[in-house]
Amino acid sequence: QVQLVESGGGLVQAGGSLRLSCAASGSTYTINAMGWYRQAPGKQRELVASITRGGTTTYADSVKGQFTVSRDNAKNTVYLQMSSLKPEDTAVYYCNALSLVGRAYWGQGTQVTVSS
């Protein structure tokens, strides 16, 4: 089992920045990719960014050049640096971890609200 705990959400004005963190515990040796999804009201959960243990990153087209995902394997922590935030970035952000056999784990979610 893997447990994920997110931190760093909050309220920010448009154009501002936030950094989300997600610390994994438990059977962390089973984790390959870690990343972030988000779900806005009335919308489906969508991938924001992910990073493999080896450092390969994937980004949603909507956040390329705006968000940066990074990972500290020694601390079993993944980060999401969000810059130039827009009101449309408002959502609950969920940390995700994917094991080597494809099992997915989720954090409890952290609210990010961008005011105009």
Image (spheres, rainbow, N blue to C red):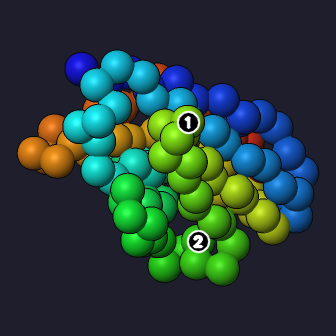
Residue at the spot x=66%, y=42% of the render?
Answer: 20
Q: Position of residue 98 (x, y in %)?
A: 26, 45
- Quadrant of the rendered structure where residue 27 is? top left
Is 3 drawn above or below residue 36 in the view shown?
above
Distance from disc 1 to disc 2, alpha carbons, whole Å, reads 25 Å
Name the element at disc 2: helix
**Comparing labels 1 and 2, the label whose residue is closer to the camera:** 1
Q: Report the residue marked by disc 2.
A: 63
* Relative horizontal placement of residue 110, taking residue 50 as reference (left or right): right
Q: Residues within 10 Å of mark 1 (few under 14, many from 20)?
A: few
Q: Report the residue marked by disc 1.
A: 75
Q: Quadrant of the N terminus?
A: top left
User: What's under tag 1, amino acid-wise?
Assistant: Lys
Q: Residue furthest front?
A: 74
Q: Which mark is residue 42?
A: none
Q: Position of residue 32 (x, y in %)?
A: 29, 50
* Relative horizontal placement of residue 94, taking residue 97 as reference (left or right): right
Residue at the spot x=58%, y=58% of the render?
Answer: 70
Q: Position of residue 36 (x, y in %)?
A: 47, 49
Residue nearest the viewer, comparing 90 with 37: 37
User: What's under tag 2, amino acid-wise?
Assistant: Val
Q: Is residue 86 visible?
A: yes
Residue nearest the viewer, comparing 58 with 14: 58
